[in-house]
Image (cartoon, helix red, strand yellow):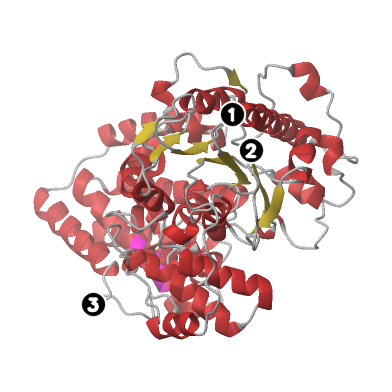
């Protein structure tokens, strides 16, 4: 390597150092030197790796800068719509992101397509005009860079002071805190070190002591009844009445009527704006996502084998379990995870022939009709998980079926134009969801077969403009708000307790169906009843956590 190339390489490193520090708002020039090094080292290694492939130094520098810009833009979009930073676990979803671009492209900025075209042209031009270096130089550079990148991802080869869960003052239990305290690039490297999931431990003695002190074991008064059970996961559904100066019934009259004539609760959910599978996982397993000790996606990190769940418990009682979701079944690896959670069939977008769409996605009315169609067969009891799509964000002005109704929706107070558009779109689709459930309720009321319907919102929608202008009645931020849940049936229901979080909802449904005492969730149900009767306590919270985590260790054949 001659002197000019050495100087050029050093200049590039200095430039990348300055570039990374200037583009990351969580990094300051006065920060500890180890933090600065931790954020620059992976970028320099990436530069060397690209040099090894392209054999062109200038082109590699530009590609490294472009890649960093891409990472920071994705990071910004995730924070805006999901209130979550970019994480290393997101890299596992690259292929399915490309396969499901119809969904994720809605969040992409408008300048992405022209910038991508210009970038391809520039890369091709630089590749053509820049003279390649010899293999004797590019191969060692690429090998050293690859070795360096791999070493950063293993605890044995990179110090925890640079890339660890507590490095640079980070708190690993707060995902946003890691990228803020460590810097985005360093947090991605730290995420690579902790990407492997290990089951959390639990204390069996807490469970034993709790059960030993229990008396008057509840009996199953409906032991012979096996009602059809429908879980309706309402995409991005929340009660607008939690916003100051907003009356729910003024905007969602159908929902208001349904809720007021059902058993109801409000749920703490583990996500905001997206990542529906976190809420799904909690509802289906009874395990709080936060207790897993990972910020990764549950179907990727946890569900690798058959896992104890509500569907498996129902299957042991003779139920036929079906997922209905009018989107691609491979999204978030549901096609792989759902059979492991106990589902027999998966009715996805490809099974809907020319479905009615309202906005971008198949309508909730279409989903309701498909649920009713599946319920026509009553040979065996059925458990159906219906995962809606109509209410999925983002919420620009869309082509909807009833533009007059959508455009007549007034905001609760003066808002900016973008906020008004988001508000109208959200309210329009939320009322559609409520009408779809109302139709389903009418069908259930006409049935002879016992049927239970449990409706719940998976998370608040991504309404960045609206949420910047409104205040919530409880004084908390949008990601801290709860979502509504209600249940109705065509048979008398007795409720012993109400769920406070989505990980309690599935157990509650078993209670309402009169089946919980015949499942592996009976002890958890008793603990939740005890909390309802005696109130919260640290001792009982520890018992609940032990019972929840125990489910991850239980064989589905137990």
Q: Which residue is mark 1?
A: 447
Q: Of residues 535 and 419, which is closer to you in this image?
A: 535
**One can see residue 32 in this view:** no
Q: Position of residue 51 (x, y in %)?
A: 24, 50
Q: Which mark is residue 156?
A: 3
Considering the whole magenta stretch, tell me its main secondary structure: helix
Asked which secondary structure carries label 2, the reply is: loop
* Callout 3: SS: loop
Q: Earlier in the sequence, mark 2 or mark 1?
A: 1
For the residues labelled 2 and 1, the Cα–Cα distance comes to 8 Å
Tag 1 or tag 3, which sits nearer the N-term?
3
In the picture as drawn, the residue positioned furthest to the top comes out as: 354
In magenta, the rendered stretch is 37-42
Q: Is residue 14 above or below residue 78?
A: below
Task: Report the Cα–Cα distance between label 3 and label 1.
Answer: 62 Å
Viewer-proximal residue among 488 and 411: 488
Image quarter in which the C terminus is found: bottom left
Residue pictured at 55% horizontal, 56% vertical: 221
Query: Residue 192: x and y, percent?
Result: 33, 64
Residue 33 falls in image quadrant: bottom left
Magenta region includes residue 38 = yes
Which residue is disc 2 drawn over? 490
Against 437, residue 174 (above or below) is below
Residue 231 picture location, percent across and down: 54, 42
**Are dots 2 and 1 in contact, CB under 8 Å?**
yes
Residue drawn at (40%, 40%) of the image:
321
Q: Earlier in the sequence, mark 2 or mark 3?
A: 3
- Distance between the Cα atoms at labels 2 and 3? 59 Å
């Amino acid at each position: 390597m001659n002197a000019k190339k050495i100087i050029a390489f050093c200049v590039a490193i200095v430039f990348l150092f300055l570039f990374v520090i200037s583009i990351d708002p969580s990094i300051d020039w006065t920060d500890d030197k180890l933090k600065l090094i931790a954020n620059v080292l992976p970028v320099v290694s990436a530069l060397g790796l690209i040099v090894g492939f392209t054999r062109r130094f200038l082109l590699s520098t530009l590609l490294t800068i472009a890649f960093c810009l891409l990472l920071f833009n994705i990071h910004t979009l995730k924070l805006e719509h999901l209130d979550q930073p970019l994480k290393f676990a997101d890299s596992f979803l690259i292929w399915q992101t490309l396969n499901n671009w119809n969904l994720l492209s809605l969040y992409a900025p408008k300048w992405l397509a022209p910038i991508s075209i210009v970038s391809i042209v520039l890369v091709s031009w630089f590749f053509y005009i820049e003279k390649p270096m010899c293999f004797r130089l590019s191969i060692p550079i690429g090998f050293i860079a690859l070795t360096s990148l791999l070493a950063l991802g293993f605890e044995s080869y990179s110090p925890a002071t640079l890339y660890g869960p507590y490095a640079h003052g980070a708190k690993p239990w707060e995902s946003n805190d890691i990228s803020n305290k460590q810097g985005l690039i360093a947090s991605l490297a730290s995420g690579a070190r902790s990407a492997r999931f290990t089951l959390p431990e639990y204390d069996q003695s807490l469970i034993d002591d709790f059960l030993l002190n229990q008396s008057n074991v509840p009996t199953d008064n409906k032991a012979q009844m096996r009602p059809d059970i429908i879980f309706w996961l309402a995409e991005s559904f929340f009660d607008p009445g939690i916003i100051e100066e907003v009356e729910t019934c003024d905007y969602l009259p159908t929902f208001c009527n349904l809720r007021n004539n059902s058993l109801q609760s409000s749920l703490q959910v583990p996500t905001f704006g997206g990542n529906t599978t976190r809420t799904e996982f909690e509802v289906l397993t009874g395990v709080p996502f936060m207790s897993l000790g990972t910020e990764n996606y549950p179907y990727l990190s946890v569900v690798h084998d058959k896992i104890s769940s509500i569907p498996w418990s129902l299957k042991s009682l003779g139920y036929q379990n079906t997922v209905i979701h009018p989107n691609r079944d491979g999204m978030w690896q549901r096609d792989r995870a759902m059979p492991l959670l106990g589902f027999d069939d998966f009715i996805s977008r490809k099974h809907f022939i020319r479905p009615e769409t309202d906005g971008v996605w198949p309508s909730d009315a279409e989903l309701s009709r498909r649920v009713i169609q599946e319920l026509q067969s009553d040979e065996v009891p059925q458990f159906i998980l219906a995962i809606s799509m109509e209410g999925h964000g983002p919420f620009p002005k869309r082509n909807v079926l009833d533009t007059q109704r959508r455009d007549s929706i007034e905001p609760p107070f003066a808002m900016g134009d973008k906020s008004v558009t988001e508000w109208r779109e959200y309210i329009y689709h939320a009322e559609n969801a409520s009408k779809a459930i109302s139709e389903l309720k009418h069908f259930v009321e006409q049935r002879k077969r016992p049927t239970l319907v449990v409706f719940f919102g998976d998370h608040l929608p991504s309404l960045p403009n609206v949420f910047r202008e409104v205040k919530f009645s409880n004084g908390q931020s949008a990601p801290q708000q709860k979502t509504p849940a209600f249940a109705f049936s065509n048979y008398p229901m007795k409720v012993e307790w109400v769920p406070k979080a989505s990980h309690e909802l599935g157990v509650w449904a078993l209670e309402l169906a009169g089946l919980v005492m015949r499942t592996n969730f009976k002890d958890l149900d008793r603990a939740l009843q005890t909390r309802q009767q005696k109130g919260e306590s640290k001792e009982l919270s520890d018992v609940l956590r032990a019972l929840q985590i125990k489910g991850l260790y239980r064989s589905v054949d137990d």
